[in-house]
Image (spheres, rainbow, N blue to C red):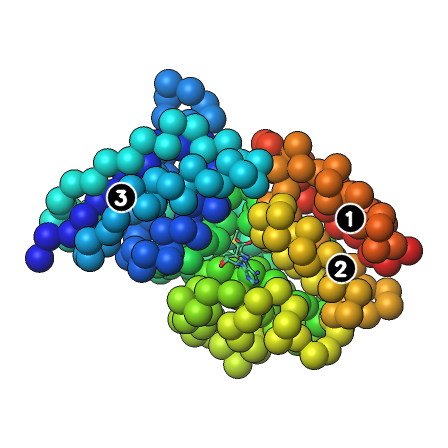
Amino acid sequence: MNWKEININTTYQAYPAINNLLQELEVKGITKEELESDEDEILIKAYLKKDINLEKLKEKISSLEEYGLRVGSAKLKIKSVIKEDWASKWKENFKPLRVSDRIIIKPSWEEYPSQKDNVIIEIDPGQAFGTGHHETTEVCLRLIEDNLDSDTKLLDIGTGTGILSIAAAKLGAEEIFALDIDPIAVKVAKENATLNQVETEIDFVAGDLVEVVDKTYNLVVANLLPHIIVNLIPDLEQVITENGKFILSGIIVDKEEKINDKLREYDFKVIERIQLGEWVTIIGEQK
Ligand SMILES: C[S@@+](CC[C@H](N)C(=O)[O-])C[C@H]1O[C@@H](n2cnc3c(N)ncnc32)[C@H](O)[C@@H]1O
């Protein structure tokens, strides 16, 4: 059966948000290529079976500008492709990636020679965000590694593929609760946890921000878009233990001050900020 390939010319900055929009359309695979013409421009390719309303998708992409995201030319094209062709090409885009001295991310179909102390995480991208190939995920993984010990109780808000929770489980966290507003992401995350044999160590639940959380955690990670983080901050206190820390990522550099203002308003302090490309990650705690 023929599949459809949607091509979207946009910016790197808008990728996580467009990825979310595409997930709502039940796409089966998403890739991004950096375009040589302009270092900030990327080409997103997404594959799906059903017909979609291209105009409506274009409108939704354009409306991301209202949240301060540059979407670039946002040119959309659609063409028919044969599944065998895209499935093998799509796989070529996911190679093993070392994100720290210990952590390596790899898709299930790639081999990686494991060495002592390596933490190898197998992630099949499927329909959710979080293969480690994005700066925000990469920095979160490193910070989780640096801040985790056997007493860590992790809350992972917006788990996507489950990558951060799976890493925490493999690094020896005591307890992990992972949630995502998107039930498809929760399904993909559970499958990835099973692939990594840590499914019994993580509770996955579908839910909006902290509405399904009824406990406190000493490490909270949220890799979300800036306007969603702004909505999360007022509720952070109810899910963090007194001496707990939080990691907020997905912050485009020109939105950082807005996030800092909100953190000050709710009596949180920033311990450290890490910038990779145009993305900022903040680690903080209560004052
Ligand atoms: C940028 S991805 C991060 C995925 C993964 N944690 C990582 O670091 O790569 C953001 C995820 O947050 C989810 N999300 C967006 N809004 C949310 C909300 N209000 N509550 C919970 N999850 C949300 C999205 O569905 C998406 O899977």
Report x, y in % for residue 183.
44, 69
* Label at residue 121: none
* Label at residue 234: 2
Which residue is located at x 62 percent, y 48 percent?
Answer: 227
Asked if the residue under mark 1 is in contact with the one under mark 2, i.e. CB atoms within 8 Å, the reply is yes
Q: Quadrant of residue 38?
A: top left
**Residue with the mark numbered 1:** 262
Q: Quadrant of the N terminus?
A: bottom left
Q: Amino acid at mark 3?
A: Leu
Q: Quadrant of the C terminus?
A: bottom right
Which residue is located at x 44 percent, y 52 percent?
Answer: 20
- From the viewer's side, name the closer residue of 38 and 148: 38
Q: Amino acid at mark 1?
A: Lys
Q: Is residue 142 visible?
A: no
Q: Residues within 10 Å of mark 1 (few under 14, many from 20)?
A: some
* Label at residue 54: 3
Q: Quadrant of residue 136?
A: top right
